[in-house]
């Protein structure tokens, strides 16, 4: 009877170059010296690839900070980079950490926001703005205003509406202008699909004091819960992210917030936009990147402090997004606190 050969248990499952192992081990020591991880985060069977073990520890730390998310799905990746090795500077290698979010798909947010706007003028607008602000600082999400920016980039030559594109293609030919307008995405389609306040306006958002008063007075528990989510989100001190440092168009959105069951515009625009960007090859998916010296435990500890704030923002954003897209907001449910 034939038997399958067995390998000695001392033979590793994966061969890792000695140089990579030394660099990974150096960063693993830095991770421990930073004082932000403990033994509970270490895998039961550490990999021969020390950097993979470090990534597993980072993911475990983030998971512990975030708790159970219901919508957002962040990811992290690590790789080591030589310190200007080609230039012969002799600098130590650094670790590059990238992060982003996998898409939760398409969810409907219009009924909830319109219900909030009916409850109190500017409330729906305030909630949407708070969501957008936090998303751009943590895990970006497609919202109506972002979709309109994609339409401007895809169809309108970066303008406010389609007029410049039609002028460029058709000149003064009235028949051609009308034919082109009927076949393309227009600003009128956005105006028909979304309320004006969802596409960006100069109207001031409601202040936190007003939001607290509305939360306390709300007899619809869903509305009160959403407002409290927004207050928690606004309480997180998230710094701005400088997107100008990245080259290309960002496409790594964590999901799509369509408006309602008849909103076919959102998916149409995003399909065309992503096809255009994909064909250009000029894009990036991770929404964040940090480069840390492989032996700089103080810098790593500081980054984990910032990451803790980031996790608080992600947790609040996840809760708000879930509440806005869960259940039937077309009916008026009431309940006690």
Image: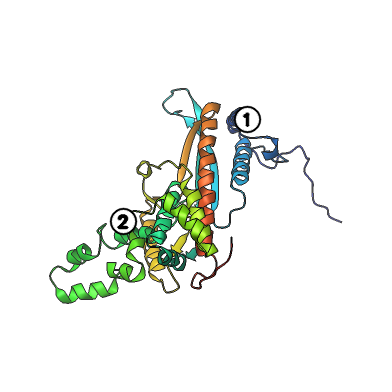
Q: Nearer the viewer, mark 1 or mark 2?
A: 2
Name the foreground residue: 84 vs 333. 333
Q: Determine the image quadrant of residue 333.
A: bottom right
Which residue is rendered at x = 45% and y = 42% of the image?
A: 238
Q: Say what secondary structure mark 1 lies in.
A: helix
Which residue is rendered at x = 53% and y = 63% of the image?
A: 222
Residue 103 seen in the current view = no
Along the polypeptide, which appears first: circle 1 or circle 2? 1
Q: Which residue is mark 1?
A: 32
Give the CA distance from mark 1 to mark 2: 49 Å
Q: Is residue 272 left or right of residue 25?
A: left
Name the foreground residue: 283 vs 269. 269
Which residue is rendered at x = 24% and y = 72% of the image?
A: 180
Q: Which mark is residue 203?
A: 2
Asked if labels 2 and 1 touch by Cβ distance under 8 angstroms, the answer is: no
Q: Is residue 197 left or right of residue 105?
A: left
Q: Determine the image quadrant of residue 295.
A: top right
Q: How busy is the neighbourhood of tag 1: few (under 14 within 10 Å), some, or many (20 plus)?
A: some
Query: Which color scheme does this rendered protein use?
Result: rainbow
The answer to whether 93 is drawn above or below residue 69 in the figure is above
Position of residue 57 measured from the top left corner of the image (x, y, whole percent):
63, 40
Q: Looking at this rendering, what residue extends furthest in the right direction?
A: 1
Name the foreground residue: 114 vs 45. 114
For the image, the number of numbered tags is 2
Quarter containing the C terminus: bottom right
Position of residue 127 measured from the top left corner of the image (x, y, whole percent):
43, 57
Position of residue 99 measured from the top left corner of the image (x, y, whole percent):
50, 45
Q: How busy is the neighbourhood of tag 2: few (under 14 within 10 Å), some, or many (20 plus)?
A: few
Quarter containing the N terminus: bottom right
Residue 256 seen in the current view = yes
Position of residue 281 measured from the top left corner of the image (x, y, whole percent):
38, 53
């Amino acid at each position: 009877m034939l038997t399958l050969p067995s390998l000695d248990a001392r033979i590793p499952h994966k061969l890792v170059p000695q140089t990579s192992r030394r660099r990974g081990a150096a960063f693993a020591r830095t991770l421990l010296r930073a004082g932000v991880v403990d033994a509970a985060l270490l895998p039961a069977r550490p990999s021969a690839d020390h950097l993979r073990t470090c990534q597993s520890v980072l993911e475990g730390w983030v998971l512990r900070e975030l708790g159970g998310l219901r919508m957002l799905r962040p990811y992290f990746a690590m790789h080591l980079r030589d310190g200007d090795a080609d230039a012969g500077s002799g600098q130590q290698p650094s670790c590059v950490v990238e992060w982003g979010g996998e898409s939760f798909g398409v969810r409907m947010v219009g009924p909830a926001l319109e219900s909030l706007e009916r409850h109190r003028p500017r409330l729906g607008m305030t909630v949407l703005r708070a969501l957008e602000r936090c998303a751009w600082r943590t895990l970006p999400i497609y919202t109506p205003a972002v979709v309109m920016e994609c339409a401007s980039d895809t169809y309108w030559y970066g303008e406010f509406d389609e007029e410049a594109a039609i002028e460029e293609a058709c000149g003064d030919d009235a028949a051609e202008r009308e034919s082109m307008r009927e076949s393309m995405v227009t600003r009128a389609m956005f105006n028909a699909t979304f309320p004006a306040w969802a596409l960006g306006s100069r109207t001031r958002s409601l202040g936190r004091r007003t939001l607290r008063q509305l939360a306390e007075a709300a007899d619809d528990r869903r509305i009160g819960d959403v407002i409290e989510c927004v207050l928690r989100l606004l309480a997180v001190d998230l710094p701005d992210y400088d997107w100008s440092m990245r080259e290309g168009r960002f496409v790594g959105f964590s999901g799509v917030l369509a408006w309602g069951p008849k909103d076919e515009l959102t998916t149409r625009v995003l399909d065309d936009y992503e096809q255009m960007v994909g064909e250009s090859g000029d894009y990036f998916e991770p929404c964040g990147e940090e480069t840390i010296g492989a032996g700089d435990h103080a810098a790593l500890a500081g980054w984990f402090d910032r990451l803790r704030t980031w996790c608080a923002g992600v947790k609040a954003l996840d809760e708000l997004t879930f509440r806005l897209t869960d259940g039937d907001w077309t009916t008026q449910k009431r309940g006690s606190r």
